[in-house]
Amino acid sequence: MRTISSITMSVPFTLHKTCGTSAARAGVLSTAHGSVETPIFMPVGTRASVKSVSPVQLRELGARIILANTYHLALRPGSELIRDAGGLHAFSAWDRPILTDSGGYQVFSLADLRKISDEGVRFQSHIDGSTHTFTPESVIDIQRNLGPDILMVLDECSPYPCTREEALIAHERTVGWAERSRTRFRETEPLFGYEQYPFAIVQGSVYEQVRSASARSLADLDFPGYAIGGLAVGEPREAMLEMTGFTADLLPEEKPRYLMGVGKPEDIVDAISLGIDMFDCVIPTRNGRNGTFYTHTGRVVIKNQQYARDMGPVSDRCDCYTCRHFSRSYLRHLFQSGEILGLTLATIHNLHFYLALVAEARTAILDDRFPAWKKQFFRDYTP
Amino acid sequence: MRTISSITMSVPFTLHKTCGTSAARAGVLSTAHGSVETPIFMPVGTRASVKSVSPVQLRELGARIILANTYHLALRPGSELIRDAGGLHAFSAWDRPILTDSGGYQVFSLADLRKISDEGVRFQSHIDGSTHTFTPESVIDIQRNLGPDILMVLDECSPYPCTREEALIAHERTVGWAERSRTRFRETEPLFGYEQYPFAIVQGSVYEQVRSASARSLADLDFPGYAIGGLAVGEPREAMLEMTGFTADLLPEEKPRYLMGVGKPEDIVDAISLGIDMFDCVIPTRNGRNGTFYTHTGRVVIKNQQYARDMGPVSDRCDCYTCRHFSRSYLRHLFQSGEILGLTLATIHNLHFYLALVAEARTAILDDRFPAWKKQFFRDYTP
């Protein structure tokens, strides 16, 4: 038996540079499935598939690490099945890093009739109404079965708005669960011969004192990485950015910081300047499937009549497969006709745009010109 | 101005070999966008997209020539728009050969309130109810705009069943229209600098005498290629094969023969043995999107419970992208979850299967072992 994780929880991150003006950082995440330069955006593949693109297309558009979801996969097809398939990488034919979310957020946003206690959370599947229980321990076990490179511990995600008292209770439960998660993680072994890294999730809603308590308590537990959860759940953009910066400043400098569920391009640029290393969001994929293409000047709503005879690419600054081969006119035709290829081409373009955006930010940080780059981004981009 | 087509209608086909036992043939179609070895199967890209796959995926799975539809494209986005985009190849980023169907079949199967006369056919769009008229001349003009390598002339497709008298009227109208199409074709020029080849369509329903009259009249018009239409419209399989063989025997040996809308793998193998060179059908793509995978032993209905934990490929004899990377278990998960990637992977597999099937048939013909190959196909394959 390998005993890697029972001895230590090593940190899969090297910080290369911090911007002198802002808190922006450039680093590298190192996993058994490859290295990931940060800041990074992680395309969302909830059910072990990034919607409408194949693993080869994902690789070609530049994806380095993708996200899948414990909640969805535990319900269907089940984590034991994926374990028997050799883990998520083998099951879905993606050989670069994978991060799995814990299911905490989904239990609170998707499941029916949830009942939470200190022990864990009981809920009914949104698929078939069957009853399930997630505990900190079971969520570690499930993610041992799934075999992601990075796994998230179970947390209680406060809704927005919530009272300070509610935020405090959720924070305390989240810290208790993180401790139990750490214990279970140390008692168990990776099933596929490579190391996995558990990240803890800071909660606390929009209350600085609660965020602060959460960040400090979790930092004491010495996880390999930290996420900021409970944001992008309906609060104003200003509150999101304020809490992000406030929380990031409290997290250990040498460990990766992941802002969950954020966001729009402008949110990502701002959050990078606040010291965030990792992002995930459904916006580029979901909005792409609705016909919204992101470019450095803003959004292109491809169904608009003005693009009917526009023979230029979505963006003449973009070198993605979509922009190299297809006109706005053709893309509009695909969306007008309901052709599936439209969804694929929009997804390829948007994910490429998001990945190019974070790569540009990284280069700017390394070249000591991040503040100027950020200024130029906001000059060009109309939210 | 180029005057290629006003002087002659050359034949884009070379016959390489005919099976000694059956009427099966191996040849090559030669077009400005490349050569196509026959027998060939043409994936259907009705609205300038083969559903759920990109041009790169199509190329990688082995597609050599694809089909698009005049009826659909004339209605949306309109043939002038596609002309202004530089033709279908540029519009859809497919640089191999394209054949466009005439829209005759679609007017009779999809449009509302159609009114047919010797002049042409008036109909209402199935999309928005707008009124349109197709004449033999306008359908040539539209296909000059679209710029396919091979274009079909307007025909009247008899429904099944129909009386001999109805079949006779449709045949006579089809021949008259073919003559007018030929005249219009000779009076016009290709718009994109490469030669286009018009094919005529034999009608006659299941009546040998009408089929015979149709084939002979159209052969006299000296088209570069011939299609057999009006089959695969509901008649028994035996009647379809009987009419196919009967008609193929009457067509000029040195010209390509295209059996429209056929069919299942077993139909294609039988029709090859009757002397057919070209096929198109929505079965591999449409049934793929319903979760049916074709293999050399028959169909795999991937949603069946028996595949839930089946970690093998759809077919261990297949080297398509899908079979090289994904298990039946993962594919079933995609279909159970409604993931778009399932549609793409099924389409890739099925089109690859169809293309490998006709390629195998061709090799067998060239190697003088087509009858044995066909026997083996039917031994392995359960319809």
Image (cartoon, coloured by chain):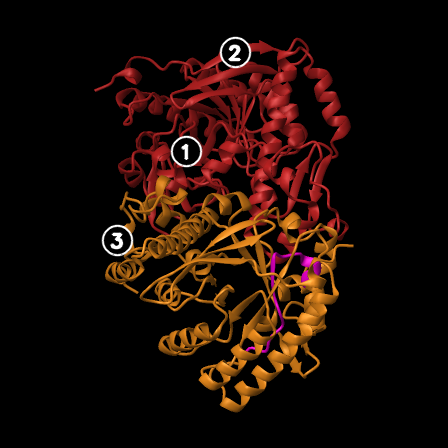
Chain colours: A orange, B red
Q: Tag 2, which chain? A: B
Disc marking residue B94 = 1
Q: Are marks 3 and 2 in contact (CB under 8 Å)?
A: no
Q: Is residue A145 magenta?
A: yes
In front of the other: B176 or A337: A337
Q: Secondary structure at mark 1?
A: loop
User: Of circles 2 and 1, which is in front?
Assistant: 1
> Relative to A230, does residue B82 appear above or below in the rendering?
above
Which of the 4 quarters of the picture holds residue A311? top left
Which residue was labeled with disc 3? A306
In front of the other: A200 or B204: A200
Closer to the chain start, of discs 2 and 1, is 2
User: Of circles 3 and 2, which is in front?
Assistant: 3
Image: magenta residue range: A143-157
Q: Residue at x 61, y 46 (%)?
A: A93
Q: Looking at the picture, how far across and down is residue A123, in whole percent?
A: 67, 76
Which residue was labeled with disc 2? B15
